[in-house]
Structure formats: C-alpha cells, structure tokens
Amino acid sequence: MRAVFEKLPNSTLRGRIAEKMQQAILTGVLSEGEKLVERKLAAQFETSLTAVREALIQLEAEGFITKKPNAATYVTKLSIDGAEKIFAVRRVLEAYTIEEAARLVTSEQAQELEDCYLDLLDTARSQDAQVFILKDLGLHEKIWAIANNEYLQVALRRIIHPIFAFSAIRILSGRPFDLLEDAQSHLPIVEAIKSRNAEAARRAFLTALDDWFFKTKAYVFRQAEKR
C-alpha cells in the first residue's frame, strides 16, 4: 500500500486516524477498492495497531471501508448489482421504519425532523456536497430513531451507510448532482410523518426511493436510463 499518511499526536488517535482516512477516501487519495493493510497504516501514522483497528472499525460502521470474508480490508467499492440489492432491502425495511415513525412521532420529534429538513435545504443551497450527504444521512437516521426500534436502526445503518459513503466518493470526484432537487424530494416524506399518516409516508418514501435509485445509477454509476 502507498505511503499517504504521516504521524499523528497521541490524543484522540482513533477519531483522528478515521478522519484522515475518510478525507483521503473522499478526495481520491485512497482509491475505490484499494486494499488497506493495518501494519502499513500503523507505520505511516506511527501509532499502534490497536488505534488503527479501532479507526477501521469506525470507518466500516460509516460505510467507507469493507471487510471481505478473508479478513482483508478495502476502500468501499459498490457494483450496480450491489446498489440494486441495497435499494431492494430499503424498499422493505426502511419503508416499514418510516411507517412506524409516522405512527409514533411526537410533536417534539416532528419539530426536530422539520429542523433537519430545513438544515438539509440550507446545505443544498450552499452547494457543499460533502456536508449535504452527511446531512441527508442524518435526516434518514432521525426518522429511524423516531421509529424507536434499535434493531431496525442497526440493520439500516449496516445496509445503507455504504451507499451513502460510495455516493459521496463518486459525487465529490466531480460528477454533477442537483443537491437542491434531491433535498426537496424528502419533503413529502417529512410532511407525511409530521401529519402521522403512515400510509402516505410509505407512498412518499417509495416514490422518492425510485427517484433516488435512478439518480444513483445516473450520477453515481453513470448508467442513465429512460424513466
């Protein structure tokens, strides 16, 4: 593996290593699918294997790296087939979660969700794609939390984080993407949850999901097709 990192101070090593590696992934210094070797990373950062392993665990949870069955670790690289499988699972699990959120949402949570959406809109207007993707994920995670099922939250994070991470890698590499249009596609979902209409929330999500999948193919995988 290429030497692309330098020694870091001992304080908050795990978080700082993870942050440095995330930036390297998002800016293309580390390539999609590139193999990561723990000992070489520890040597570059001049730190312990433990700190590197903890950072890699964090990055895996965030979807930026993937551990293969043979225990090798790679920068996340998704195929269109992998993306299709993720979206297929989202149609079932996330749609159910959104229905539950609409049934259980409190007035306070509805306001928090509205605030998340407005924050997403502001970020879209600023054209900061990296922050936008994080805010987009944060909006989804807010909905998952409202559904109040920790098992669903764990499953959705494991399934969906990689598609957000890979989208960030691809979009930040220069591919055009309409952030404001994407942000606005969340409004019907937010409004349906706020009104506690579970069926409308499900319909709005599935409609938006079809559009998000089309955009994922068009902008992330460059497989634009006729609607």
Image (cartoon, rainbow, N blue to C red):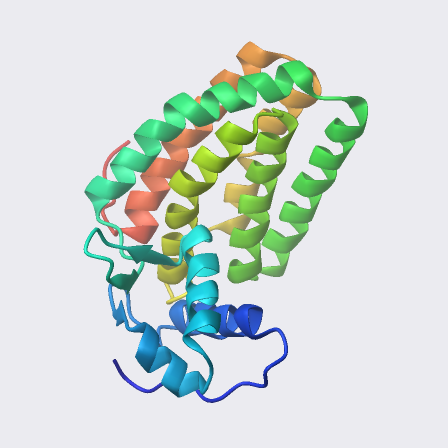
Q: In the rendered image, which quarter is residue 77 located in?
A: bottom left
In the displayed structure, 25 sits above or below 194; it is below
x and y percent of residue 76 in the render? 31, 58
Residue at figure coordinates x 62%, y 73% from the top left: 12
Residue at figure coordinates x 63%, y 18% from the top left: 102
Q: Name the residue nearer the viewer: 156 or 178.
A: 156
Residue at figure coordinates x 45%, y 70% from the top left: 50
Quadrant of the image containing the C terminus: top left
Residue 58 placement, left or right of 15: left
x and y percent of residue 17 in the render? 50, 74
In the displayed structure, 165 sits above or below 216; it is below
Residue 94 in view here? yes
Label count reads: 0
Quadrant of the image containing the N terminus: bottom left
Q: Name the residue nearer the viewer: 171 or 177.
A: 171
x and y percent of residue 105 in the render? 70, 21
x and y percent of residue 2 in the render? 27, 84
Residue 177 in view here? no
Residue 110 placement, left or right of 12: right
In the displayed structure, 14 sits above or below 121; it is below
Residue at figure coordinates x 29%, y 55% from the top left: 67
Q: Name the residue nearer the viewer: 171 or 88.
A: 88
Q: In the rendered image, which quarter is residue 57 located in?
A: bottom left
